[in-house]
Image (cartoon, helix red, strand yellow):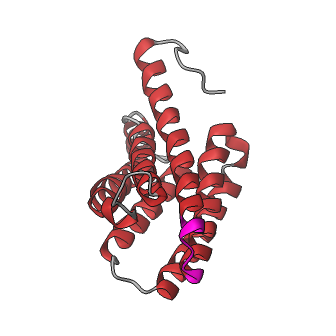
Amino acid sequence: MSNEATGAQNARSSGADAGSLGYLALGLTLLAYGLLSTGIFSGTGAKDAATLAHLVGGLTLFVAGLWQLRSGEGFTGTAFTSLGAFWATWSAAGGAGKNAAGLFLLLWALLALTLTAASWNSGLFSRAVYGLLTVSLVVSAIAAFGSSGGLAKVGGWLAAASGLVAWYWATAALTNSGWGRAALPVK
């Protein structure tokens, strides 16, 4: 490898990690979508999370994913860019019929399943985020196909749980990095 290429590689790997940004964006979007899907807030639903899903979930995740790919982080880069595309598309498709919505959620559940399998050796938090997301998308797809409000609420709670794990993971990483010690447990 030439010195020029080595210098480029070193410059790329010394950049800031966007993993925490990506997991914060994923966590906050999943929490909002999940909680609004449960019906615990009177008069709200999943559609009310569309702006947050588009800007935080779509744009921020996509940019964080590109940042991760640029720094050589293939897994989080793939996860964040693809999930960013999911949230941007979901927010833009607001009026989709039940079969289209169910198929969309089911297809994205396949992506989440791929991410779960790929992250299996990465630790409990990674398995929890992507595993809960997979189950949430499958349950939400079944709810959409069957027009089941009860299953949609279960899917919402699963999404909120996934979001909470992602948010905590990012918070712990940022806190521990800032404090220079393990202030919040991550294992």
Give residue 45's position: percent from left, percent from top.
38, 63
Whether residue 123 is visible: no
Q: Over which residues does the magenta segment extend? A: 145-152
User: How many marks overall?
Assistant: 0
Give residue 9's position: percent from left, percent from top.
43, 43
**Eyeballing the image, is 15 above or below 162?**
above
Which of 111 and 101 lies nearest the eye of the viewer?
101
- Residue 49: image quadrant is bottom left
Whether residue 55 is visible: yes
Which of 7 and 69 lies nearest the eye of the viewer?
69
**Eyeballing the image, is 123 above or below 83?**
above
Give residue 39's position: percent from left, percent from top.
44, 57
In the drawing, does residue 146 fall left or right of residue 26?
Answer: right
Q: Main secondary structure of the magenta part?
A: helix
Q: Residue at x 55, y 71 (%)?
A: 108
In the drawing, does residue 81 fall left or right of residue 143?
Answer: left
- Residue 6: image quadrant is top left
Which of 18 and 88 lies nearest the eye of the viewer?
88
Q: Residue at x 43, y 87 (%)?
A: 97
Q: Within the magenta stretch, is there residue 150?
A: yes
Q: Residue at x 59, y 53 (%)?
A: 158
Give residue 147's position: percent from left, percent from top.
54, 80
In the drawing, does residue 71 fall left or right of residue 161?
Answer: left
In the drawing, does residue 149 fall left or right of residue 91?
Answer: right
